[in-house]
């Protein structure tokens, strides 16, 4: 029975989303790639908050951002950065 608490400690970080620093380079990189894939310039992008969840295939980021070139409104995106950092991000929702 003593292995159950250890299993929870190992699995819990995978199940629960983490709050990220909006200035985290990985969050900025994922958001910049998504904006670029949408055919827009990443200039004027300001990340306000983000959450992430790691999985075996990559990391999913839930990002709230302010984009001055997108009408100056607060917007939301969910993107998945594959484990291969050279692969393009997968845009799940954007706008």
Image (tube, helix red, strand yellow):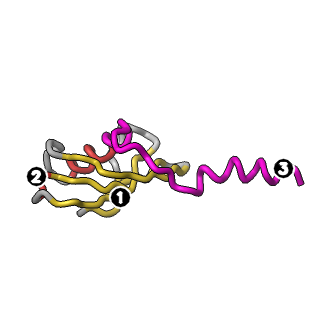
Q: Give residue 7's mark.
A: none
Q: Nearer the viewer, residue 82 or 49?
A: 49
Q: Give residue 69's mark.
A: 2
Q: Give residue 3's mark.
A: 3
Please tell me in which quadrant of the rendered image residue 23 appears: top left
- 34 displayed left or right of 4: left
Task: For marks 3 and 2, give the CA distance.
Answer: 52 Å
Q: Is residue 11 magenta?
A: yes
Residue where numbered disc 1 is placed: 78
* Label 3: few (<14), some (14–19) or many (≥20) C-alpha neighbours in 10 Å: few
Indicate the secondary structure of the residue bearing disc 3: helix
The nearer-to-camera label among 2 and 1 is 2
Q: Residue furthest right?
A: 1
Where in the figure is residue 83, as x and y percent of width and height? 46, 42
Q: Is residue 33 magenta?
A: no
- 73 displayed left or right of 47: left
* Residue shown at the point (43%, 53%) measured from the top left: 51
Of the two numbered discs 2 and 1 on the same chain, state the one appearing first in sequence: 2
Q: Main secondary structure of the magenta part?
A: helix
- Give the magenta part as a residue range: 1-29
């Amino acid at each position: 029975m003593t292995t159950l608490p250890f299993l929870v400690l190992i699995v819990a970080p995978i199940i629960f989303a983490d709050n990220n620093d909006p200035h985290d380079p990985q969050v900025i990189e994922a958001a910049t790639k998504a904006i670029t894939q949408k055919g827009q310039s990443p200039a004027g992008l300001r990340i306000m908050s983000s959450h992430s969840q790691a999985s075996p295939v990559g990391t999913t980021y839930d990002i709230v951002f302010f984009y001055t070139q997108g009408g100056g409104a607060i917007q939301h995106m969910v993107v998945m950065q594959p484990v291969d950092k050279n692969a393009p991000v997968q845009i799940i929702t954007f706008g």
